[in-house]
Image: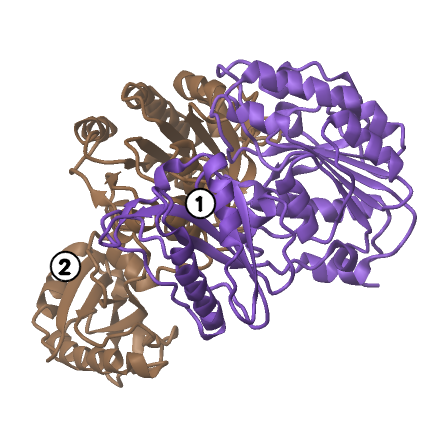
Chain colours: A brown, B purple
Amino acid sequence: MDIHKLTSELQVKNDSKIVMLVMDGVGGLPRTFDGKTELETANTPNLDALAVRGVQGASIPVMLGITPGSGPGHLGLFGYDPLEFLIGRGALEATGIGFELQPGDVAVRCNFCTLDEAGNISDRRAGRIPNDQSVPLVDKLRQVAVPGVETFVEPVKEHRFVVVFRGEGLSGDVADTDPQATGVPPLNPVAHDQASEKTAEVASKFLDQAKQILAGQPKANFLTMRGFAAKPHLPPYHDVYGLKAAAIAVYPMYKGLARLVGMDVVGQAKTLEEQMDLLQEHWDEYDFFFVHFKYTDSTGEDGNFDAKVQRIEQLDAAVPRITALKPDVLIVTGDHSTPAFMKGHSWHPVPTLLVSERCRPDTCQQYNETESTRGGLGQFEAKYLMVLALANAERLTKYGA
Amino acid sequence: MDIHKLTSELQVKNDSKIVMLVMDGVGGLPRTFDGKTELETANTPNLDALAVRGVQGASIPVMLGITPGSGPGHLGLFGYDPLEFLIGRGALEATGIGFELQPGDVAVRCNFCTLDEAGNISDRRAGRIPNDQSVPLVDKLRQVAVPGVETFVEPVKEHRFVVVFRGEGLSGDVADTDPQATGVPPLNPVAHDQASEKTAEVASKFLDQAKQILAGQPKANFLTMRGFAAKPHLPPYHDVYGLKAAAIAVYPMYKGLARLVGMDVVGQAKTLEEQMDLLQEHWDEYDFFFVHFKYTDSTGEDGNFDAKVQRIEQLDAAVPRITALKPDVLIVTGDHSTPAFMKGHSWHPVPTLLVSERCRPDTCQQYNETESTRGGLGQFEAKYLMVLALANAERLTKYGA
């Protein structure tokens, strides 16, 4: 079943506005079996008022029991089956630091490492050298020049950085050079298919020159390459949904993910207030707005239940600024759950709320996990959420006569 | 997952009776977000009594967010995945006027149009000429004789009519001749594949002769052809379910859809009472009865909430005539929702009720949208309904040992 084939065929244009408010990692767990989740503990009068008017369900990001990373989590919300559309590790890392990949680019995750005198790896992470040591080394590597391709080298954090190769005829199926062991030399980049042979050659030349440049460094005297990945092909929002879409996010990863599906990244907000300002400013220019709120995830990752509750309440207080704009369809959801109890992402379904004039309201009185399991949307795969959004915006015509 | 492969393998025969009562477009929306739907407003003591005994769920006709036409809506109920089995426009139009398509037939939707002296289309609908003018012209077109094929010409409404070509070696993949514009000549019928070349030639000859016949008509001096479609291949009920099936419908479209899956169309009922009479009369002859009630859809299409409520109550009053026959399995459902609020079909899930001695009753007390979302069948794709019907009729044996 090809969702985008259907939405491409059935899409119609109108002047409706759709807002998708993503509370990253919003789903949680109670601290005790009879207790309340973060969302159920939080005082959320605005979200609850929406729950009364709207229809709720429990969305499954990927598959029952599967915990998604940020990439698959957002792809699902954006309507791209996360089991079909894959963002390779290198491409996700480049996206996460705000690097704008172009079609045909190949991105690679790199680690500085330490080689001993025999040329064997003695430390796969070069002692996790701090940024103030690694960033200048990344800068030195920008001297590398491989004929026929353009090369970008960008720091990530500590020993981690990204290399992007740009040129004709590059493909991403190249084996890692990290042997995942010490006491052995790094591997050579080997192409898994013919289309990736040029990439392997280019990487090999890059590594040769890098070795010269890094020679003599006390710790970071070489590097390994992992997760070679071409820019993923994600048919853009405009084509598959007929939507001119804007992304309003604070963190580079989410701006990057939105760019990959053809959204415009709007503004440089640092706070939720500034995100709301941007939403208001650009209201007339776009059909669809993806608004991303990070801190429900980061507090969950920290295992800080109370801080997550506070962040949910902070978000709730911003909701009236959205509803004041009178979106035709307002969706409140998350890309996955991040229970403070688990200090990480989880597979649990995500409370998802849709409000529109044409939704069929259910009996839910609050926006939270427990209510969502008895909501009118039932339990559903997140990849269908965009179809529901378009339907409620009357942007899809009938299938068949 | 091939549903029919499973049901073909597992089917067993017995003397059970299954009734599927389809209230077309039964699902609705409240007039206000805190109000009741049409079904929730209606007084339905008989359906509610069934809801207490049975198990309910919310069926999705095609996919979350996708609004079906009558074709896909019924195919889903009949157990044919509406995304896999397609009824082409021409075939549906022929079906809708009660034309019995045979395997190999190609049906085409035609419009009378007006050509100017230069041969360009000046009116794509020939001034929407009324039936009393178009029907005699359709009759004239029956003179067309294309060697090697049999040709049928049947009126639909105003400028619309259907042509069916019957013969060896015809296939339906031919481009429309309607250029969708005025001031340009009609297009020639062009085959999209080799198998359809004969159809294109036949259509071309038909058009040549039709031009002669219509020459001199003030408005309808030519025609365009759209939606060429072969009879769809739908494996018949008898094979895939082992059921001898009867359709009891008032409108030609639903009789036609039932014929396409191998049901016998029984009688010529004009009213619900007559439909009930037919059900009773033919009770011993068939295993399965599809009973179609149109007016819940047509009142919804009219945007007439109160009339839809009345039609639901009318249907409810007929239910005792069905239960008096003691069907082993009684299903009450719809092919889609048609909320009066939207004046048209919609994507909303359909309250679906199944009553049998072997169903596992849930806690639902009424048959309606809100109850259906907390029913024992959960939310499910309509295409699985026939499997549930067979199971409850003990007409399926175990899968695997």
Q: Left or right of B225: which side holds A96? A: left
Q: Nearer the viewer, residue B292 or B183?
A: B183
Q: Which residue is mark 2?
A: A135
Q: Left or right of B328: which side holds B42? A: left
Labels 2 and 1 touching (C-beta < 8 A): no
Say few, some or many: other residues with alpha carbon within 10 Å of mark 2 (under 14 / 14 to 19 / 20 or more): many
Q: Is residue A381 above or below residue A54?
A: below
Q: Which residue is mark 1?
A: A344
Q: Nearer the viewer, residue B16 or A348?
A: B16
**The disc numbered 2 marks a residue on which chain?**
A
Answer with the quarter of the image where residue A34 lies: top right
Q: Is residue B165 above or below residue A301?
A: below
Residue A199 numbered mark, or none: none
Q: Earlier in the sequence, mark 2 or mark 1?
A: 2
Q: Closer to the observer: label 2 or label 1?
A: 1
Say few, some or many: other residues with alpha carbon within 10 Å of mark 1 (under 14 / 14 to 19 / 20 or more): some
Residue A161, given in percent of the width and then of the height, sits at: 22, 62
Question: Is residue A342 in view?
Answer: no
Residue B173, given in percent of the width and then of the height, sits at: 46, 64
